[in-house]
Image (cartoon, helix red, strand yellow):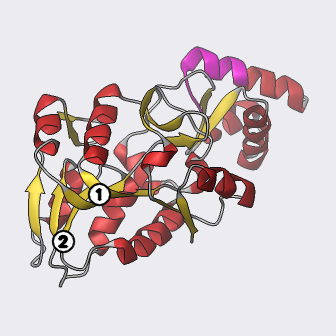
Amino acid sequence: MYAPERQQEILRIARESGRVDVLSLAEEFQVTAETVRRDLKALDRAGLVRRVHGGAIPAGRLDFEPDLAERESTAADEKDRIARAALAELPTDGSVILDAGSTVARLAADLPLDSPLTVVTHSLPTAARLADHPGIQLHLIGGRVRHRTRAAVDAWALRAYGEVRADVLFLAANGLSAAHGLTTPDLAEAAVKRAAIAAARRVVLLADSAKWGQEHFARFGELSDVDLLITDSGLSDADAAAVEKAGVEVQRV
C-alpha cells in the first residue's frame, strides 16, 4: 500500500471511530510506528486530523478531551520546565489561584515547603498535593466534580470565586490562538476558568507550545486576559510575536 492510500484509510478509520492510535495502526498496516507518525503528521498538516498523545482525532472533534492520566504523560519534560519557571511568579507573601491542569499541578508539587501562601483551587488532585503542605493555607472550591479532570464546576464553584480576590492566577488551557483566544472542551470548566480570571489581579498562563493554534469547543477568554504566558522553546518566534501582539509577555523555557 502506498502512503497516500494508507493515509486515506487512516482518515476513514479516524472519522468512523473518533480516534486512532499509533500502535494499532502500525499493527493493522504492518508498518513501523514511525511510519504511522509520519502519516499522521501529513494528515495534520492537511488539516484533516489533530494529533494527540499516542494518536490522532478527526479535525472536527473540538469537544475531544484527554483524561487526566493521558494529560499528565504528554509533553512531560516541557511541563516540568514551565512549572519550575512559574515559581518565580509566586508572590512573596500573598494569595494565588491554581487552575485545574496538568502543568499547574506540577507547579503545586514544586511549591517550596517554606511558602507562606494562601492557595485557592477547584482541582482535587492539586488540593490533595497541598493538603499537608506546612506553609500553605489551602482553600478548596467546591461543586460538581467532573470525572475526566477531577475539577469542581457549576454554581457552587462560580459563587465561591466571586467572593475572592487573589494576587495571581496560574491558568491552564487546552488551546490558545490569535483568532479564538483561550479554549477548553467543556462549557462548565470554561465558566469556572472565566470566574477565576475575574478573581485575580494578575493572570499567568502555563501552556506547552503544542497548544498554540489548537481550538476547542468552549471559549473562556481572550489572549489579552493573560499577563504572562510561560511556555516551552517549541513556540516559534512568529507565534510568540502573535501572542505578544495581544499585549501578553511571553517567556519560553
Note whether 90 is above or below 2 in the view shown.
Answer: below
Give percent across and percent down for residue 66: 43, 38
Q: Write the start and end of the magenta stretch as one range.
A: 11-20
Of the 4 image quadrants, the one containing the C terminus is bottom right
Most prominent secondary structure in the magenta stretch?
helix
Q: Dot 2 corresponds to which residue?
A: 94
Q: Dot 1 corresponds to which residue?
A: 201
Give percent across and percent down for residue 49: 67, 29
What is the spatial separation of the Cα atoms under label 2 and label 1, in whole angstroms?
A: 12 Å
Residue occupying the far right of the picture: 2
Whether 12 is among the magenta residues is yes
Q: Name which quarter of the figure residue 128 lies in.
A: bottom left
Give percent across and percent down for residue 144: 15, 32
Residue 126 visible, this angle:
yes
Amino acid tagged 1: Arg
Of the 4 image quadrants, the one containing the N terminus is top right
Crowd band around label 1 with a 10 angstrom C-alpha radius: few (<14), some (14–19), many (20+): few
Give percent across and percent down for residue 220: 39, 35
